[in-house]
Amino acid sequence: MVRNKMESDANGMKQLCSALCQIRDAEQMEHFLNEIMTLAELHDLTLRWELMRKLSQGVPQRQIASEMGISLCKITRGAKILKNKDSITRKFLIRKKVL
């Protein structure tokens, strides 16, 4: 049963990623995300993105935790992602000159 769930999750993720890649307009993307996600899910996603941006700009982890009211554990995870030279998130932030 777990294997089928994992396969189903992987298939669902591929389909979701394919759908997201087809949306080229920021306004349409915003509408799409508002349609498929709850307010809490959107909040978590935007919070995660903001912490990644702050980390990429060199804001200290403790300052981020204090300003955003989130755990150092979440921030440390983000920092590890940005330290990985193969990280897609890191490459995206560099390409968009957010770093």
Image (cartoon, grey):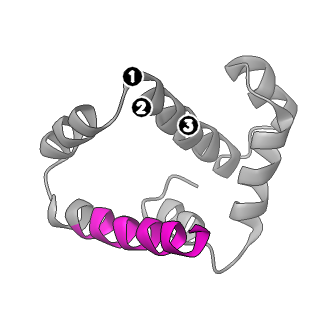
In terms of depth relative to the viewer, which is nearer, 94 or 6?
A: 6
What is the spatial separation of the Cα atoms under label 1 and label 3, in whole angstroms? Answer: 16 Å
- Residue at figure coordinates x 62%, y 73% from the top left: 87
What is the spatial separation of the Cα atoms under label 2 and label 1, in whole angstroms? Answer: 5 Å
Looking at the image, do the residues carrying marks 2 and 1 touch, with CB atoms under 8 Å apart? yes
User: Which residues make up the magenta segment?
Assistant: 1-18
Which amino acid type is marked by label 2? Answer: Leu
Q: Earlier in the sequence, mark 1 or mark 3?
A: 1
Q: Residue 39: which disc? A: 1
Q: Which of the two marks, 3 or 2, is nearer to us in this view?
A: 2
Which amino acid type is marked by label 3? Answer: Glu
Q: Residue 42: which disc? A: 2
What is the spatial separation of the Cα atoms under label 3 and label 2, in whole angstroms? Answer: 12 Å
Please give the residue where the numbered disc 3 appears in the rendered image. Answer: 50
Q: Earlier in the sequence, mark 3 or mark 2?
A: 2
Q: Horizontal and vertical percent for residue 37?
A: 34, 35
